[in-house]
Image (cartoon, grey):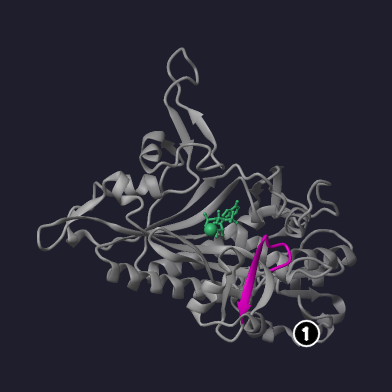
């Protein structure tokens, strides 16, 4: 992409009321725009990154049998009344509205803007699950959730409107459920590995419900995190403070001295739901022996936007963002220095060659000072900065600097592709 054609611009300032580093940097770099507290727009560059994160998650969900769908945000209150979660004293993050009713504008039936989709999907699956032969099923989606969060000070990590990947498992019996739950755990760990957060993300024991003692969270170490966890480095697991009791420690065979307290953010959460929703919403199936049984469910959430914010927080330095190659909006930031004909032509040729070879290049074809270009390259966090100037061209070379290093090196123009494609 040519920078001159990108409608967003970098800026030196972020909104004064923006406290979180992730949002400050993303706004300065033009990746996002702040609508209001806890509500952000994803602009072209932000959208590319978000979609790359989503694609990694999608691939891992498909690999364990997930089937992608897309449910509505507007939900009738009846399903939520059945599960007991319609009332504001049970769920305190509701955004509710009403259907139009002729002249009585806004006085029709009440609706909720989905904050999660157990109710909606359980009701929907009644149409497709009748027999044990219809099980298991693993529908999932990337969909907007609405939550009227009390505080929203963590930038894109805690929003009032955000995309969640939520998968729901529908199983015939406990063994079938357990087998999938273990697969989902592995898939989640793989996702965080692929996104560059593997080393600082821990499978974390957290509060369960009536159907399992624990749920499992995926907690990433970061100062901005709102959770306290106790990490067992040797076993690569952690315990959330909310279930940190002598009982649980004994259960897991862990001594207090082996644990280190850390601040972390919950980036994913998987739950065994049992019949919590299938019972009240009447989702049953006929088993092989003819008996009618409730379907056993699980839910598996992950927040692509929260992950994006966490990545910014973790990798950024004083100069700006640093994207892991797998989700960077571009692999190469290409800048000609000096507006001479030869330099511009060489930059254009490089842009064409790299692009044709499948390398994603942001071509800074703006008429700007070198200092300005370099500052933007750092702020945007693109893995490689490539500079073409009369000096480099004299030896048929270009200057390459990885974002994470201070020193640039001169490389042969023809070997650039091998270098940046790795
Ligand atoms: P928290 O305790 O942080 O409020 P939660 O437990 O309510 O989160 P879940 O319902 O488990 O969240 O949602 C699944 C995933 O969705 C979370 O692990 C997180 O990655 C993401 N998520 C949840 N709430 C938000 C939010 N307000 N903004 C952005 N992402 C979110
Ligand atoms: Mg959770």
Foreground: 66 or 415? 66
Q: Residue pushed farthest top?
A: 103
**What x and y, as percent, mark residue 233?**
61, 83
Quadrant, the C terminus:
bottom right
Identify the residue shown where x is 34% and y is 71%: 178
Q: Does the magenta run of residues contain 161?
A: no
Foreground: 379 or 300? 300
Identify the residue shown where x is 64% and y is 76%: 200
Identify the residue shown where x is 65% and y is 47%: 41
- As helix, strand or loop, the secondary structure at mark 1 comes to loop
Quadrant, the N terminus:
bottom right
**What x and y, as percent, mark residue 359?**
61, 73
User: Hey, which quadrant is residue 328 in on the image?
Assistant: bottom right
Residue 349 seen in the figure: no
Foreground: 91 or 307? 91
From this view, report whether residue 95 is shown above or below residue 303.
above
Ligand 1 within 8 angstroms of badge 1 C-beta = no
Q: Residue pushed farthest front?
A: 246
Q: Which residues are magenta?
A: 222-232
From this view, report whether residue 142 is shown above or below residue 221.
above
Circle 1 is placed at which residue position?
396
């Amino acid at each position: 992409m040519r920078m001159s054609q990108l409608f967003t611009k970098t800026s030196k300032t972020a909104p004064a009321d923006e406290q979180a580093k992730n949002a400050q940097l993303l706004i300065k770099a033009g990746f996002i725009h702040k609508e209001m507290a806890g509500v952000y727009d994803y602009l072209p560059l932000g959208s590319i990154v978000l979609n790359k994160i989503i694609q990694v998650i999608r691939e891992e969900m498909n690999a364990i049998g997930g089937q992608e769908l897309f449910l509505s945000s507007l939900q009738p209150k009846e399903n939520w009344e059945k599960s007991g979660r319609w009332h504001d004293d049970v769920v305190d993050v509701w955004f509710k509205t009403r259907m139009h009713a002729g002249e009585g504008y806004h006085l029709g039936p009440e609706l909720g803007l989905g904050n999660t989709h157990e109710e909606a999907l359980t009701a929907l699956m009644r149409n497709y699950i009748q027999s044990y032969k219809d099980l298991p099923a693993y529908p999932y989606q990337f969909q907007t959730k609405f939550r009227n969060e009390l505080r929203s000070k963590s930038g894109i990590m805690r929003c009032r409107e955000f995309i969640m990947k939520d998968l729901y498992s529908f199983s015939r019996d406990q063994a079938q459920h357990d087998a999938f739950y273990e697969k989902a755990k592995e898939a989640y760990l793989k996702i965080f590995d692929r996104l560059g957060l593997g080393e600082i993300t821990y499978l974390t024991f957290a509060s369960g419900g009536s159907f399992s003692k624990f749920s499992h969270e995926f907690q990433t170490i970061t100062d901005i995190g709102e959770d306290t966890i106790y990490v067992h480095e040797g076993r690569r697991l952690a315990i959330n403070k909310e279930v940190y009791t002598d009982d649980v420690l004994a259960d897991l065979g862990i001594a207090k001295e082996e644990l280190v307290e850390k601040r972390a953010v919950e980036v994913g959460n998987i739950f065994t739901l049992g019949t919590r929703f299938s019972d009240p919403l009447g989702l049953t199936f006929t088993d092989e022996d003819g008996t009618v049984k409730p379907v056993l469910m699980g839910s598996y959430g992950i927040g692509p936007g929260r992950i994006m914010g966490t990545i910014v927080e973790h990798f950024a330095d004083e100069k700006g963002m640093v994207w892991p190659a797998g989700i960077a909006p571009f692999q190469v930031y290409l800048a000609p220095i000096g507006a001479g004909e030869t330099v511009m032509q060489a930059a254009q040729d490089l842009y064409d060659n790299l692009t044709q070879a499948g390398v994603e290049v942001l071509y800074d074809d703006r008429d700007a000072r070198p200092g300005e270009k370099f500052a933007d390259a750092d702020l945007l966090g693109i893995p490689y900065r490539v500079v073409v100037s009369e000096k480099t061209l004299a030896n048929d070379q270009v200057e390459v600097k990885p974002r994470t290093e201070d020193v640039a090196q001169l490389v042969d123009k023809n070997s650039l592709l091998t270098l940046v494609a790795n």
